[in-house]
């Protein structure tokens, strides 16, 4: 069995580029992702294991120096994204009651960047993504066009749009269409 | 100079910037900034179309969005063409092609004009009465003829090549209308620090200053002030000014739809620009500053081309520099028409007379008219007009009767007063209130966070209105949360124009004792007589009058006609006008294109298309795909020369003889994790899960509370506290929702969490005698022997060096595996497996073969063999219902009397007596083929296929008490023959199930 | 499009993120297997469908994914209040202006 070829990871949006004047659309790098479910009372123990403070405020996120990102999705639900280490490994030793499910391949993400980034994402999303209501660091599950997405504002002019794998073609198309009018 | 009627030195357009456009077959010249209407008028053209019902010649009534007559077909090229465009709104661009509508063979000579002669036949409600008999004639004769003769423009037949944008916008204060008060409110709100959106439907702000040139604000002409304020607003970071943008719908909680026309005025638009933008605005506060709409006078033959609203004539003169005629008569009940007359006279246009129905108009106006040499006929009325394709004269006489005189005119301008434009307020669900003093409906209590200012609120005095609007804008900003910011002091304003005077209903000579055609609603061809007829016929509610006559319906929404219609109905009913009430103003305010409404949701973005990780491979290997919900699934893989039937037969055979590979990635998957995971599944499935050991899996059935089958699937226990649940492809989202519902609201005490993993795993089913041989060499860390890994077990290990959850399970009846790998590895693992499978003579198979193979084994498909009214017992699945559990969802529902009574339809196998006949799915089953029609149907076919492996057709169906009928003959009556069938067991192959252990 | 206050996200969010899931405060009987046909009918089939005050369940399905309860006026479509699943029914009253408010809540 030594000669088994190791399967390679093929991201659904591999090789796609897009955008328009004012905005660039780039598939995010492959990442490890975990859906973490736990009573928020146990956030402390989980935070310690993960190396960052689990956000407990709606619509917020946290990020550590190693690039690990955690978004609050619900009162007992977090999305952990890490392009390097695997958060599951860190969670194995946690004794506090929780559910950690690998969703690395369930989701994929599109980075939307440029001065037209906000308008591009806003075009399909009914939530208010303005600076006042959705400042840098905000994260939310919501809808974009006809699909569900998680939107994270990673910088003033940069958004990360996470969606399920099979919806990524639609998401990329929708953002490409929205990008055309992002400087309106 | 373009157009003979352009007056040098008048208007705000630049004469040097000329454009050419086509109207019917004529090439005409316009000036940049012209509307189609102003350009036609500059060329002396009033006749622009034929009316809806009577095909009467019609011209421009207005200079704005209230236009009921001048509807045109406007196009850029063969495919970019839009019917029913209001000429008064459409800006001319170079090369624009326009055509008049609703006429044949030509605008000047129209055969349909005969309808006018036959008009007694076409009175209000005619189509409810005239065409009732004989019934067959409606479809064949009446309807086609009416459809051809009536109606407006012709819909384009080509796909729309343009694109449209959507923007969700959020602001503190939305100001609808960019006239004096809207601008004031916007500026005040912006100065207070609010995020402001100001929209106006015209290319330029300024509202009434398009015509009212005798107003000043802060010492400047009103128009100049408006442009300066607009520039100031545009320069502010917290303000978005949207011109050419109509607020068309005011929905709940200050959700207002705006449509911005982006390229419709450009000769060569940048193709990257959307044609229109839909702005879905959510505003904390809305300031409605929509102004007022002038009403026409209702008198005999008031619809001839050349007869128009006084403010429109004034707009054409003062804004576009166009005289609407050389000899312009004036007929009014309102002061503002006098100002229009004065402007025309001063511009050198002959104004033979001002006819005012009021016996004693304002002496200052009378004096001014005299000074300009205009004859004043007070207390008089225009009783009729003449002129075929354009008005030639007006017949004038005292309102009290007596002698009349004809005055030659080539245009007649009129005003019955101004109707506050309460459309937006009314759409916000506010109820208008009758103001006795000014005799008009005004906004009442605000039911949303909005305020009306200016003319739409009945604020007639310009100075007061601006001050009130500025205050409203400031207060809106504060209410929206602005804290800092300065108050903006409204400047002093004054105007010479008076809006006093208000007449509703028919004028002299068009009263109840007459039979003249005095139009109330031009667009729907409704006359005063029609309204009266409606009342006489028993329509006593204004809503009924509206529908019987069509007054104020369709795109017009009664902008000029509602109040007149209401007044005439009130008079007939002998009731005070407010008691009769106003009809509801509907959205959209003016027509909105489908393009703007659907915006991005066209083509590929109409609906998401979901593809599995291995889609590319299937495609490259010639798969034909079928749509399963939003998924594209490989249906079958035809080889050269094969049709579907042959391909499926080959695939079916190969799987049972060798092996096959199937992409099952679309199956729903849910990870159930927590110490109470088994307890939770015990409640959600009919089966018991306590004794399922980690590493084993089981087929489970899920019911709804009513006891009917909701979903099914195989559940694997990965650990004491972790299950891998699968659902049907179509059921994945609703099963997740159903499980969450129970977990959160009925069983919240359970310590368990659910996570959708449908797309985490690519699933490759490898089925058939050689399945193990295909899979084994690629797997590490799992003993695949029958002993170590029997049927219905699951293991974790590695395949092709990546993690796998390997299920030993089967939906074919063969020994087989379902290889789950993280989705991004799906394609690579599939290819590695295929390399082995192909070498061993196995095939790839699609959903059709999957369906046949499972039917050969009698495995049901939820949603095909069940339809939401099938219990586990009906489906023969009682074995999967735990008998000792105290509770599970559906436990009580399935014991309802009708669900346990005899006579229920039960799932059985069906074998045609002629093995070559394949039954139609959905075909009905009867016991006696010779009974009278309608026959008693005792069941129907749910699944039916040709089975190559059985060498005959096979089918399943539900039949009343079917299990007791095994061996009995039943019948399937078809249109051409009756098919004899025998009731059988549902398992057609390997009844003992030995192949599973292969 | 309505704005709905999610009691978990603690802010108003667009209706597109939500799903209505029927009438609220209908508790599944603890001993459901043992109830009579009449009791089952009442629990499963009978709904109030009132003109005016209605108690309904919503799920912030494309947001925090939580189920919660809402009081709404079916005449005006307005939400009076929303509260978490499992919390007791919130009583409301109609003011002279016809508008519903939570009973005892400060204006």
Image (cartoon, rainbow, N blue to C red):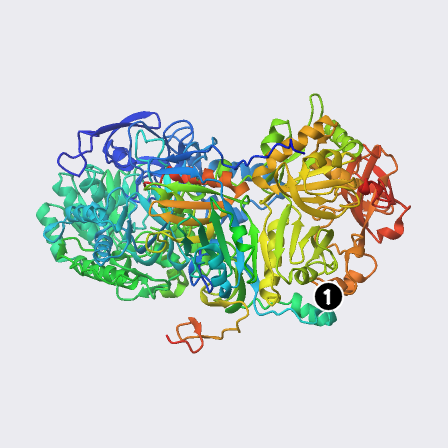
Residue furthest bottom in the image: C104
Seen in the picture, residue C49 relative to B951 is either above or below; the reply is: below
Is B642 situated left or right of B276 in this image?
right
User: For this rendering, which residue is in front, B218 or B322?
Assistant: B218
Mark 1, residue position: B892
Is label 1 in a helix, a strand or a loop? loop
User: For this rendering, which residue is in front, B766 or B605?
Assistant: B766
Asked where in the image residue B395 lies, by quadrant, the reply is top left
Question: Residue B309 location, x and y as percent?
Answer: 26, 46
Task: Say which residue appears at 73% left-offset and 48% top-offset.
Answer: B793
User: For this rendering, which residue is in front, C86 or B565?
Assistant: C86
User: For this rendering, which residue is in front, A55 or C53?
Assistant: A55
Tag 1: Cα neighbours inside 10 Å, few (<14), some, or many (≥20)? many
Task: Say which residue appears at 65% left-offset and 60% top-offset.
Answer: B677
Is B280 situated left or right of C75 in this image?
left
Decide if residue B934 is in sight here: no
Decide if residue B727 is in sight here: yes
Question: Residue B847 location, x and y as percent?
Answer: 69, 37
Question: Residue A6 location, x and y as percent?
Answer: 60, 34
In the rendered view of the protein, which quadrant contains the N terminus of chain B?
top left
Residue furthest front in the image: A2
In the rendered view of the protein, which quadrant contains the C terminus of chain B?
top right
Is A35 situated left or right of B877 in this image?
left
Residue furthest left in the image: B371
């Amino acid at each position: 069995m030594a000669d088994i070829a190791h399967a390679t990871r093929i991201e659904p949006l591999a090789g796609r580029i897009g955008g328009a004047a004012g905005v660039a659309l780039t598939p995010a790098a492959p990442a490890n992702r975990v859906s973490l479910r736990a009573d928020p009372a146990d956030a402390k123990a989980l935070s310690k294991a993960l190396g960052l403070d689990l956000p407990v405020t709606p619509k917020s996120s946290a990020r550590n120096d190693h690039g690990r990102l955690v978004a609050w999705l619900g009162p007992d639900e977090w999305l952990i994204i890490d392009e390097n280490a695997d958060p599951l490994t860190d969670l194995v030793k946690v004794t506090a009651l929780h559910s950690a499910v690998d969703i690395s391949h369930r989701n994929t993400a599109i980075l939307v960047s440029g001065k037209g980034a906000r308008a591009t994402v806003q075009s399909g999303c009914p939530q208010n993504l303005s600076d006042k209501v959705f400042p840098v660091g905000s994260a939310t599950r919501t809808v974009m066009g006809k699909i569900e997405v998680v939107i994270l504002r990673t910088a003033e002019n940069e958004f990360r749009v996470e969606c399920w794998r099979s919806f990524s073609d639609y998401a990329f198309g929708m953002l490409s269409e929205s990008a055309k009018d992002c400087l309106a | 100079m373009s157009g003979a009627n352009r007056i040098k030195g008048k208007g705000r357009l630049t004469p040097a910037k000329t454009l050419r456009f086509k109207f019917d077959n004529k090439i005409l010249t316009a000036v940049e900034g012209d509307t189609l209407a102003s350009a036609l008028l500059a060329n002396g053209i009033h006749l622009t179309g034929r009316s809806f019902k009577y095909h009467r010649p019609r011209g421009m009534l207005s200079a704005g969005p209230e236009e009921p007559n001048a509807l045109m077909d406007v196009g850029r090229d063969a495919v970019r063409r839009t019917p029913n465009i209001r000429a008064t709104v459409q800006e001319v661009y170079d090369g624009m092609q326009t055509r008049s509508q609703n006429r044949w063979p030509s605008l000047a000579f129209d055969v349909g004009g005969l309808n006018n002669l036959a008009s007694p036949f076409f009175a209000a409600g005619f189509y409810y009465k005239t065409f009732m008999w004989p019934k067959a004639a409606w479809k064949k004769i009446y309807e086609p003829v009416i459809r051809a003769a009536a109606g407006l423009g012709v819909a384009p037949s080509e796909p729309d090549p343009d694109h449209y944008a959507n923007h969700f916008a959020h602001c503190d204060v939305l100001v609808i209308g960019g006239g004096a008060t809207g601008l004031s409110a916007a500026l005040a709100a912006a100065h207070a620090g609010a995020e402001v959106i100001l929209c106006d439907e015209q290319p330029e702000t300024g509202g009434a200053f398009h015509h009212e040139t005798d107003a000043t604000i802060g010492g400047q002409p009103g128009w100049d002030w408006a442009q300066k304020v607009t520039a100031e607003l545009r320069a502010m970071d917290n303000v978005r000014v949207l011109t050419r943008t109509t607020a068309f719908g005011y929905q709940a909680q200050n959700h207002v739809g705006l449509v911005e026309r982006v390229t419709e005025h450009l000769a060569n638009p940048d193709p990257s620009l959307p044609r229109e933008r839909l702005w879905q605005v959510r505003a904390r506060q809305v300031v409605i500053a929509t102004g007022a709409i002038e009403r026409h006078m209702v008198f005999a033959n008031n619809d001839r081309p050349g007869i128009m609203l006084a403010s429109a004539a004034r707009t054409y003169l003062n804004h576009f520099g166009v005289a609407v005629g050389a000899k312009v008569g004036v007929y009014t009940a309102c002061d503002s028409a006098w100002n229009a007359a004065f402007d025309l006279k001063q511009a050198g246009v002959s104004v033979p007379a001002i006819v005012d129905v009021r016996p004693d108009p304002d002496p200052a106006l009378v004096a001014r008219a005299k000074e300009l040499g205009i004859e004043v006929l007070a207390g008089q009325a225009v009783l009729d007009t003449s002129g075929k394709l354009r008005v030639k004269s007006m017949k004038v006489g005292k309102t009290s009767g007596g002698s009349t005189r004809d005055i030659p005119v080539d245009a007649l301008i009129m005003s019955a007063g101004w109707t506050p434009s309460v459309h937006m307020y009314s759409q916000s669900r506010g109820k208008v209130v009758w103001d006795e003093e000014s005799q008009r409906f005004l906004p009442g209590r605000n039911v949303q966070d909005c305020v009306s200012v200016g003319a739409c609120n009945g604020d007639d005095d310009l100075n007061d209105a601006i001050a009130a609007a500025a205050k409203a804008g400031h207060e809106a900003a504060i209410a929206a949360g602005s804290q800092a910011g300065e108050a903006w002091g409204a400047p002093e304003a004054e105007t010479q124009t008076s809006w006093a005077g208000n007449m509703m209903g028919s004028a002299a000579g068009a009263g109840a004792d007459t039979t003249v055609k005095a139009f109330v609603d031009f667009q729907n061809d409704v006359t005063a007589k029609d309204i009266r007829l409606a009342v006489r016929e028993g329509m006593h509610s204004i809503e009924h009058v509206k529908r019987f006559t069509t007054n104020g319906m369709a795109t017009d929404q009664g902008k000029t006609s509602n109040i007149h219609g209401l007044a005439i109905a009130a008079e007939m009913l002998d009731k005070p006008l407010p008691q009769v009430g106003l009809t509801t103003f509907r959205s959209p305010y003016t027509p909105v294109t489908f393009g703007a409404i659907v915006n991005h949701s066209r083509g590929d973005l109409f609906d998401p298309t979901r593809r599995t990780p291995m889609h590319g491979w299937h495609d490259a290997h010639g798969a034909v795909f079928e749509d399963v919900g939003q998924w594209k699934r490989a249906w079958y893989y035809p080889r050269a020369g094969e049709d579907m039937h042959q391909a499926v037969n080959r695939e079916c055979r190969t799987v049972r003889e060798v092996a096959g590979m199937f992409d099952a990635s679309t199956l729903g998957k849910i990870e159930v994790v927590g110490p109470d995971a088994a307890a939770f599944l015990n409640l959600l499935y009919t089966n018991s899960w306590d004794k399922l050991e980690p590493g084993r899996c089981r087929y489970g059935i899920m019911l709804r509370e009513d006891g009917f089958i909701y979903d099914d699937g195989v559940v694997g226990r990965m650990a004491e506290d972790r299950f891998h649940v699968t659902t049907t492809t179509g059921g994945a989202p609703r099963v997740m929702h159903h499980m969450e519902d129970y977990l959160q609201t009925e069983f919240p005490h359970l310590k368990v969490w659910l996570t959708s993993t449908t797309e985490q795993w690519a699933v490759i089913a490898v089925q058939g005698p050689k399945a193990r041989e295909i899979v084994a060499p690629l797997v590490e860390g799992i003993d695949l022997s029958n002993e170590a890994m029997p049927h219905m077990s699951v293991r974790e290990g590695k395949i092709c060096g990546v993690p796998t959850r390997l299920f030993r399970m089967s939906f074919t009846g063969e020994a087989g595996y379902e290889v789950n790998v993280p989705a991004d590895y799906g394609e690579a693992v599939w290819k590695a497996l295929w390399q082995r499978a192909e070498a061993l003579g196995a095939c790839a198979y699609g959903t059709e073969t999957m369906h046949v193979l499972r039917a050969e084994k009698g495995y049901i498909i939820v949603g095909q063999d069940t339809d939401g009214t099938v219990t586990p017992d009906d489906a023969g699945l009682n074995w999967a219902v735990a008998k000792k559990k105290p509770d599970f969802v559906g436990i009580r529902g399935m014991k309802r009397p009708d669900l346990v009574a005899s006579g229920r339809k039960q799932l059985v196998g069906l074998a045609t007596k002629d093995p070559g006949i394949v039954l139609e799915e959905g075909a009905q089953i009867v016991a006696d083929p010779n009974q009278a029609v309608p026959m008693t149907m005792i069941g129907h076919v749910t699944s039916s296929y040709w089975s190559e492996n059985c060498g005959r057709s096979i089918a399943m169906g539900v039949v009343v008490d079917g299990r007791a009928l095994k061996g009995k003959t039943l019948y399937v009556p078809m249109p051409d023959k009756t098919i004899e069938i025998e009731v059988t067991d549902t398992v057609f192959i390997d009844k003992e199930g030995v192949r599973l252990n292969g | 499009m309505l704005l709905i206050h999610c009691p978990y996200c603690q802010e108003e969010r667009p209706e597109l993120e939500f799903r209505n899931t029927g009438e609220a405060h209908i508790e599944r009987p603890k001993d459901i297997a043992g109830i009579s046909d009449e009791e089952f009918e009442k629990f499963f089939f009978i709904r109030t469908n009132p003109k005016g005050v209605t108690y309904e369940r919503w799920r912030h399905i494309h947001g925090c994914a939580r189920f919660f309860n809402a009081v709404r006026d079916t005449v005006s479509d307005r939400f009076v209040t929303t509260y978490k699943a499992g919390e007791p029914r919130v009583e409301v009253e109609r003011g002279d202006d016809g508008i519903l408010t939570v009973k005892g809540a400060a204006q």
